[in-house]
Image (cartoon, rainbow, N blue to C red):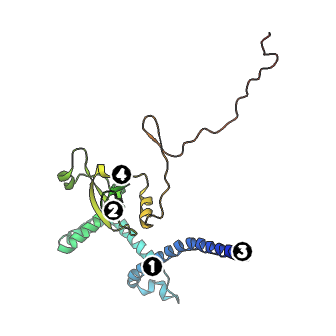
Amino acid sequence: MSDAPKTSGMTRLRNYFLTGFVVCAPLAITAYIAWSFIGWVDSWVKPYIPARYSPDTYLPFPVPGFGLIVALILITLIGFLTANIVGRAIVGFGERLLGRMPLVRGIYGSLKQIFETVLSNKGDMFRQVGLVEYPRKGVWSLVFVASEKETEINEKLDQDGDPLIAVFMPCTPNPTTGFLMYVLKSDIVLLDMTIEDGAKLIVSAGLVAPEVKSKMVTLNGEPINGTVANPPLGPHPARRSRTASSRPNK
């Protein structure tokens, strides 16, 4: 009789702890990542700031984030200067100078193309999530499907009516690393989940899965997104009651 309240009390304490852990752990990890990033930027920028312009010279404690603010202002200023004719000429001269360096030329060109693709041409990013059979038949891996482009690979390996599509298969739990594969379009099973949902699924190792939205199909074969329900119940029309005056005379 006396053990039942103790057991229920310990169960409640455990549930409270788990609930608090679920709330605090993401906040703590996010704060740690943000603080580490701010410290990393400050360690790179602050040494180049003159002492008379740094608030650390006049305060008894360092100001975190001041280097990040200076970096953001400088990057914005460089973008503003690059937008005019003089800035484009300076950037073009610098790129031509880098183009003459054997090792630096390839690194700079690749990085510039990647950043331009990610930040400028958002329409050319991954457009859908899919599944491919990898590493063997019957085992499916999540991939991000890129847009269809005509490349030398397509020219040499495409089949009639079934082109090759570039897919990126990320690794768990770090989706920034993975494998680039060219797969036949007919071998890709496209999913309805978004890119963000696919990334969450990979980072969580399958623990955080998006909700499945059921679809209805019309007679024309077109899918209907969302829930389909009966029309709301409204007031029923009054039934006709046969009174004595409306009854036929016998």
> Hey, which residue is sitting farthest top in the picture?
250
Find the distance from the CA under tag 3 to the CA under tag 4.
53 Å
Residue 5 got which mark? Answer: 3
Label drawn at residue 169? 2
Where is residue 84 drawn, in percent x and y? 32, 63
The span from disc 3 to disc 1 (Cα, nearest Å) is: 45 Å
Residue occupying the point 22% across, 74% down: 104
Residue denoted by label 4: 189
Q: Where does the image place residue 98, in percent across and percent down from the top left?
A: 21, 72
Q: Secondary structure at mark 3?
A: helix
Q: Is residue 86 visible?
A: no
Quarter holding residue 19:
bottom right
Q: Quadrant of the N terminus?
A: bottom right
Residue extending farthest bottom: 60
Q: Nearer the viewer, mark 2 or mark 1?
A: 2
State which tag comes first along the sequence, 2 or 3: 3
Nearest to the observer: residue 248 or residue 208: 248
Which of pointers 4 and 2 lies earlier in the amino acid sequence?
2
Identified by mark 4, the residue type is Val
Q: Could you tell which of marks 3 and 1 lies nearer the N-terminus?
A: 3
User: Does residue 72 appear to the left or right of 159 in the view shown?
Assistant: right
Residue 204 lies in quadrant: bottom left
Between circles 1 and 4, the one closer to the viewer is 4
x then y, percent, for residue 83: 34, 63
